[in-house]
Image: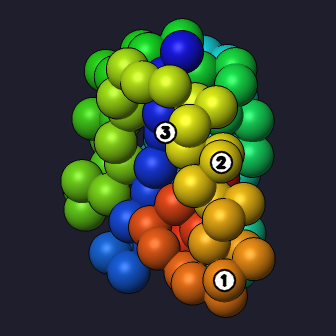
Amino acid sequence: MYAVKVDQQRCAGCRNHLDTCPTDVYEIHNQTSAPVDPEKCIGAENWCEPCEQETISVTKGDLERVKEVKKREDRLGVHSLFSQAGL
């Protein structure tokens, strides 16, 4: 499994990666990129290269753990990078 993130503070919403992502993980929401189907990620990091701001990261990891952290943050009203990335 892969964890996919977007740094919402730096994302310019360029859309360059939308055509290169082989599994359509991302969409544009509120003029920035957001991972809408992170479970589909196959770790093809080369598709991130079109991002001039280098805001997208793909790391091999435990997606279930990321989701648990996000749920806990939601309950506490905390907003980390996971929340901002749409995970």
Residue at image position (48%, 33%) is 3
User: From the viewer's perspective, is residue 4 above or below residue 82?
Assistant: above
Residue at image position (57%, 84%) is 78
Query: Image quadrant for the N terminus?
Result: top right
Q: Which mark is residue 32?
A: none
Residue position marked by numbered label 2 in the rendering: 68
Residue position marked by numbered label 3 in the rendering: 4
Taking 63 as reference, is 12 left or right? left
Q: CA distance from mark 2 to mark 3?
A: 15 Å
Residue at image position (34%, 42%) is 57
Disc 3 is placed on an element classified as strand
Residue position marked by numbered label 1 in the rendering: 76
- Of the residues shown, which amino acid type is indicated by label 3? Val
Taking 60 as reference, is 16 left or right? right
Q: CA distance from mark 1 to mark 3?
A: 23 Å
Dot 2: within a 10 Å radius of its alpha carbon, few (fewer than 14), some, or many (20 or more) residues? few
Q: Earlier in the sequence, mark 1 or mark 2?
A: 2
Q: Farthest bottom residue? A: 77
Q: Are marks 1 and 2 in contact (CB under 8 Å)?
A: no
